[in-house]
Every structure is written in structure tokens, then in C-alpha cells.
Image (cartoon, helix red, strand yellow):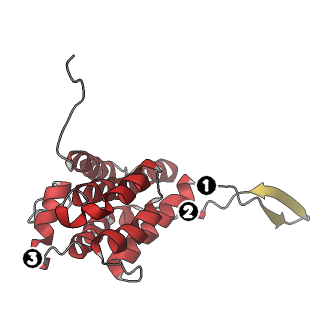
Amino acid sequence: MADSRSLASPHSLIWHYYECLKRQIRRVPTDASDAVQKQELALALFLAVSVVETFINAFFRVVIEEDDYRVHRERVLKDIEGRASLEAKIKEWPKKVLGQKLNPSTPNVKRFLDLKDHRNALMHFVSSHETIELAGPVYIHGLADMSAFETLSLESAVEYPVIIRNFAFEIFAARGIAEERLPHSFHRWFGEPPSNPAF
């Protein structure tokens, strides 16, 4: 019986998702209504975080097959199978597998964590069920805080590839990749040549 699976290099899906993200940002309309623009920006934000989670999963899956890191194989595979949160993987895997904790207060890490938190506010949206008082007095109950949606902007979205690149550099550096090789590692994993800007 023939194998019907489609096999490829571990970075292949990351290349696809990263290209989707850049295309999504480019297609955000600047001449459409604010609501339409925000809808497209929300999709870009979701994609940006998905790109990084796919990268984290694939990168560490490759690392744990190397002789020096094979001791961590069972733990990482268990986390992947158990669908550990992205936050847990970012916090634990670099420290446990690579011996290097990512500092959440460094700009490259913090910017991505802020991006993830913004995505979470939209992806895991729950109505805040608030009340406002108008003249009369009239009270309107059951309103939701839409700030996370309303603060989406094209100016922020065009920075997503930069935020992703800088965060990936932190992962590569934790792996022991020399600074001058970071752009080449990014090229390998995300498909963006060192000399090319994101757009």
C-alpha cells in the first residue's frame, strides 16, 4: 500500500505561514471602512502568533533529535502531544532543553509576549459584561470591552514580521547560534533571505 502522506522539511509549513502573514498584512485595505480594516488586522494578528507557535514546535522537535539534546525528547514530545500552551513552551523549553532561559523583560521577548497577549484577548474573548450610565438616567447593561479589537492598527501589523524575526533570534541565540549566523538561521526556518526586508 502506497504511503499517502506528504512529507517535507520541518521548516516548510513555517515558510508557508510566514508568507501568508506577510500577504495578509499587505492586503489590509487602507481605503475601506474601519471595521473591515480591523477584521483583516485581526486575521494578521492570529497568523503572527501561529507562525511563532509552529516554529517553536518544529524547532524544538528537531533539536531533541540531536545527540546532545535527546535526553529531553520524551518531555518535549509529551508537551506537544498534551498541547502545552505556547506560554508554557516559551517559558520552559529554552530553559529545560537548551539550558538558557528567555528573559521576558528583554525587548525582543517582551514584544512577542505582548503580541501573544493581544491575540489571546481576541481569541479567548469573554464579554466583560459592563454597565454604562447615560443621561436620564439610563443604564445599559451587558456591554463588552472591545479595546483589544479597536486598538488593532496597520502601523502595528507591519511590525509583526520584525517582532517574529527578533524573537526567533532569541531562540537561535539560546541554541548557541552565533550572532552573525542569526539571519541565516532565520532564512532557513522562515524563508526570508538575510538581505531582504519583510516586505
Residue at image location 22% in from the left, 71% down from the top: 175
> Which element is circle 3 on?
helix
Cα distance between the residues tagged 2 and 1: 9 Å
Residue at image location 31% in from the left, 58% down from the top: 73
Q: Which mark is residue 125?
A: 1
Residue at image location 18% in from the left, 40% down from the top: 8
Residue bearing the label numbered 2: 148
Cα distance between the residues tagged 2 and 3: 37 Å
| Amino acid marked by disc 1 | Phe
Do we see residue 149 in this rendering?
A: no
Q: Which mark is residue 73?
A: none
Residue at image location 38% in from the left, 81% down from the top: 103
Question: Which of the two labelled residues, at mark 2 and mark 3, occupies the earlier sequence position?
Answer: 2
| Amino acid marked by disc 3 | Glu
Query: Which quarter of the rendering shows the N terminus?
Result: top left
Do we see residue 125 in this rendering?
A: yes
Residue ranking furthest to the right: 137
Viewer-proximal residue, 168 or 70?
A: 70
Residue bearing the label numbered 3: 180
